[in-house]
Amino acid sequence: MRRILTLLISFVLISFSVPPTANSASVVVITEPTHRLTDGVFFDDQLSFELSPAGRLGQLVYLPSPGVRSWQVDPATISEIVAMSAGYGVIDGGVASGQIIAQQWLAQFIKVSKPAKVSYITYGNPSAYWANEIPKNQLTYVNALSEINLEAFLGKAVVGSAPISGVQQSLSKPAVNIFKYAQRQINLLATVVGQKELDLYQLRLMQLLNPNLDEEKLNILIKDFDQSITKMRSKLKIKSIKFTVTSENEELPITIVNDFDSVVKLKLSTRALNSKVEVAQVEEITVAAKSKQQLLLPLKVLAPGDSRLLTQLTNLENKPVGYPVYINLKLAVISPVATWITSGAAILLFIGALIQSVRRVRRRQ
């Protein structure tokens, strides 16, 4: 009996002395919903607390953990911490106190993760449901960016991707419509500009699909994101202007603006909104990066008055990019018919005056 009791006590002591992670690696997940607006400005200073030794992210890297560990890391979170470590401001005017905290956290994270395996989380840790519903055709590309960004920060290879979040984010119908509209615009612009110029907007969309964003913050971030898509779409535009046309056949100087860093090849689609003018179509246009280009749009006036042109830039497959623009026309041109009528009336008046003069001469005689 004493021998059995001794064995039981020994077994219990051994069980308590062996750490639970000795036979299986503990997985540490580093991810945090965004604390920045689309332009990179922080809207609060909550992240600095999370990175402190007492915060959620701080405890993950500062508290000792026995055994082999593997890490699942969201590159979007690392990107925000790196931005904080370089110095930052808070949009509400609050005190930005996290620069040193962020620097210390990054140094500690690199130290503790160096001997362990690291895998990447899809940028922004989006909901799997919406990631496969809205930017579904871009998911492979986003994952490639996630891996590249994380490897560049760590200075070593990562071992693959972590499972995407299975939580379905609750999104209102207007929010879904904004996200789908944004994705369509990103896809359209990708047909004329370099993909890298659109990465900011694509990755931002993934961040906003994070199911851990609370509703109040999400509504603010969606509004901010929608405004950024408007600015992105306006980088290719036609300058709106009014013209007074004084001749039957005219060439209107139209200015195309390209604010992207890529050379773009476009078409100009133009339609007259009434029958007073006819307008020719302009084929391929090449516009240099960060520049303006003027082209001449052939126009034929059929009747005097006012008219309007609806102009739209398209890609080479005739799909619209940028916003449509209306060009107002004042047609101060006398048509040939009106010229003939005026000339005929003038001749008749001259003949009438001549007859009157002859009659007066005869009367005097």
Image: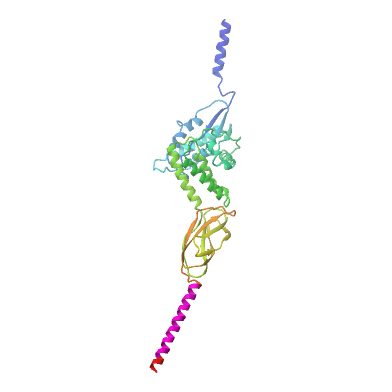
Q: Position of residue 97 (x, y in %)?
A: 42, 39
Q: Nearer the viewer, residue 180 or 69?
A: 180
Q: Quadrant of residue 43?
A: top left
Q: Name the residue: 48% across, 47% down.
A: 228
Tell me: residue 125, above or below residue 248. Answer: above
- Residue 202 in view in this figure: yes
State the residue lying farthest toward the top: 1
Quarter of the picture holding the C terminus: bottom left
Magenta stretch encompasses residue 320: no
Q: Quadrant of residue 287?
A: bottom right
Q: Position of residue 194 (x, y in %)?
A: 57, 50
- Residue 42 in view in this figure: no
Tell me: residue 13, above or below residue 221. Answer: above
Q: Magenta stretch: give its range.
A: 337-360
Magenta stretch encompasses residue 359: yes
Tell me: residue 329, above or below residue 337. Answer: above
Q: How is the image coloured?
A: rainbow
Q: Position of residue 112 (x, y in %)?
A: 54, 32
Q: Position of residue 177 (x, y in %)?
A: 49, 43
Quarter of the picture holding the N terminus: top right
Q: Nearer the viewer, residue 318 or 4?
A: 318
Q: Name the residue: 55% across, 11% down.
A: 9
Q: Nearer the viewer, residue 167 or 60?
A: 167
Prevailing secondary structure of the magenta residues: helix
Q: Quadrant of residue 364?
A: bottom left
